[in-house]
Amino acid sequence: MNKYVASVLEELTKKQPWEKEFLQAADEVLSSLSLVLDSDPVYQKQKILERMVVPERTILFQVPWADDKGEIHVNNGYRVEFNSAIGPYKGGLRFHPSVNLGILKFLGFEQVFKNSLTTLPMGGGKGGSDFDPKGKSDNEVRNFCNSFMRELYRHIGPNTDVPAGDIGVGGREIGFLFGQYKRIRNSYDSVLTGKGLEWGGSLIRPEATGYGNVYFAQEMLATKGDSVEGKTVLVSGSGNVAQYTVEKLIQLGAKPISMSDSNGTIIDPDGIDAEKLAFVMDLKNNKRGRISEYAKKYSGAKYHEGKRPWGLAKAEMALPSATQNEINEDEAKALIENGCICVSEGANMPSSPDAIRVYQNAKILYGPGKAANAGGVATSGLEMSQNAIRLSWTREEVDEKLHNIMKNIHKNALDAAAEYGTPGNYVNGANIAGFKKVAAAMIAQGF
Ligand code: NDP
C-alpha cells in the first residue's frame, strides 16, 4: 500500500475508531488508489485524501414528532454534505433505526465516487434519521417528515444539496418531505428527487437502481461472451431496488429465485415471475407486509426465518439489494461452491471485505455497488435536468439514457482498471475513475 494512503487511513482510524462502516469504506476506496497516487505527487501535496475523507459540512439536528396518541418522540436527524467539487451535494435519505453518523459517512463518502462515475455534475452527500417508518401510520410518518424538513430545508436547495430516497424513504416519504419544503420556502424547487410523476418526478426513477444493476451485470457478463438470459439468480431485499432488479431479470429471461426482508428469505425454485412479483410489490408497497406471506400464497416456495439468501440454493448470479455487510466470508464461499459466477451489488457495500477477497480469489465477475447501483442517482440527475428545462422525457428516452450511462460506467471502470494494471478489477477501476475527476476539480478550485 502507498505510504500516503497508509498514513491517512491510520490517522482516520485513530480519530474515529467507532465509525466502523466509514472506516471500511475509506479503506476499500483509498487502498485501490495507491497506483494513481504513486503516479503523481500533486495529490499528496494538495492533501487531496485528507480533504476527501472529511465531509465539507455535517449537520445534526433533533426531530421531535407526535404519534397518533399524542405522545412525543425525539429522533436524530442528519445530513452529511461530503464533497461538492463537481456539483451540488446529491445522495439519499435513510430512515432506519440503525442509522448513525458512521453509517451516513460511509454512504456519503461512497456517493462522491459513485456520482462522479455517472459523468453527471453531482457532488456527494447522504442523510437520514434513526426513525423507523415500519409499523407507523401515514399520519405519524407525515408528522415525522414535516418535523425533519422543518430543519433540513435551510441546508438544501436545487444548487446546494438535492436529497433523494434510500432505505425507508420511498415515494410516500419524498411526497411529505417535498410538500413541507414547498410550504416553508414558498418555492417549487427541484430540491428532492424521486418525486411523483404528476409533480416533477421522472419516469424510470423508481426502476433505475434495480434496472441499472442488471444492465451493469449484463455488461460484465458480455466481457465473457455470456448474458443474464437463462441464469438462476439470488436477490436479497424486497424493497425498491430488489423489486425492479427482479422485474428486469424476468424481462431479460433470467430466473430470480429469492427475495428477503429483515425477518427472513423466501426461495422459490420455480422462479419469481411477473405475477408473483406483482404480489410482492402490493405486499410491500401498499400493505407494508412481510415477505413470509409469499410462501403462504405460493406453495412451491419455502420461507427461511432469520436467514439471508446466500447458500440457501444453487445460483449462477447474486444481486444483493438489501443493506450493507449482508454477505460475509462464509456466505461468499457458499455462493462460489453453488456455482455463482457473477455478483453485482444493488445495495451499498453489501459484501464484507473478506467476502470481496473470496470473489477475487475465485476470479468471478464482481461489480461493486458504487458502479453497479449508480443508475439510481444517475436517473435522479436526469430528473434534475428535466425539472431545470421544465420538460418530461418519455419512458423509453429515460431508459435509453440510463442504459447508456450504465454502459459508460462499466467501460470507464474497466478501462481505468486496465490502465492501472489490474484488468477486470472493477473495484479498482470504479474507485480510480471516480477519484480522478473529483480530485482534478478540487485541485482546480483551490481550497
Ligand atoms: P427499501 O427500504 O425500499 O428496501 C430495503 C430492503 O432491504 C427491505 O426489504 C428491507 O427489509 C431490507 N433490509 C433493510 N435493512 C436490512 C437489514 N439490516 N437486514 C436485512 N434486510 C434489511 O430500500 P432500497 O431498496 O431503496 O435500498 C436497498 C439498498 O440499495 C440500500 O443499501 C440502499 O443504500 C441501496 N441503494 C438504493 C438506491 C435507491 O435508488 N433506492 C440507490 C442506490 C443504492 P425490511 O422491510 O424488513 O426493513
Image: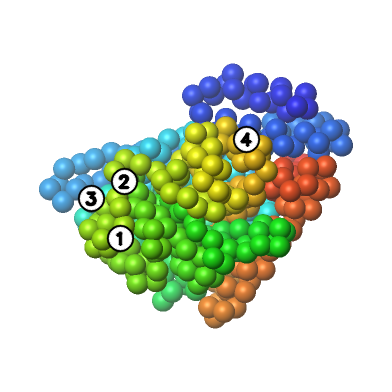
18 vs 90, nearest the viewer: 18
Disc 3 marks which residue? 135
Pair 2/1: label in front: 1
The residue positioned 60% from the left and 36% from the top of the image is 358
Identify which amino acid the numbered label 1 is placed on.
Answer: Gly
Q: CA distance from mark 2 to mark 1?
A: 13 Å
Disc 1 marks which residue? 300
Q: Secondary structure at mark 4?
A: helix
178 vs 155, nearest the viewer: 178
- Mark toward the start of the polypeptide (1 vs 4): 1
Q: Could you say where residue 382 lies in the image, as x and y percent from the top left?
A: 59, 68
Pair 2/3: label in front: 2
Q: Could you say where residue 420 lies in the image, as x and y percent from the top left?
A: 82, 43
Does the Cβ of the disc 1 residue fall within 8 Å of ligand 1?
Answer: no
Q: CA distance from mark 3 to mark 1?
A: 29 Å
Identify which amino acid the numbered label 2 is placed on.
Answer: His
Identify which amino acid the numbered label 3 is placed on.
Answer: Gly
Disc 2 marks which residue? 304
- As drawn, is 234 to the left or to the right of 3? left
Looking at the picture, the colour scheme in use is rainbow
Disc 4 marks which residue? 357
Q: CA distance from mark 2 to mark 3?
A: 22 Å
- Mark toward the start of the polypeptide (2 vs 3): 3
- Mark toward the start of the polypeptide (4 vs 3): 3
Q: Are discs 2 and 3 less than 8 Å apart at CB?
A: no
253 vs 259, nearest the viewer: 253
Position above or below: 49 against 236? above
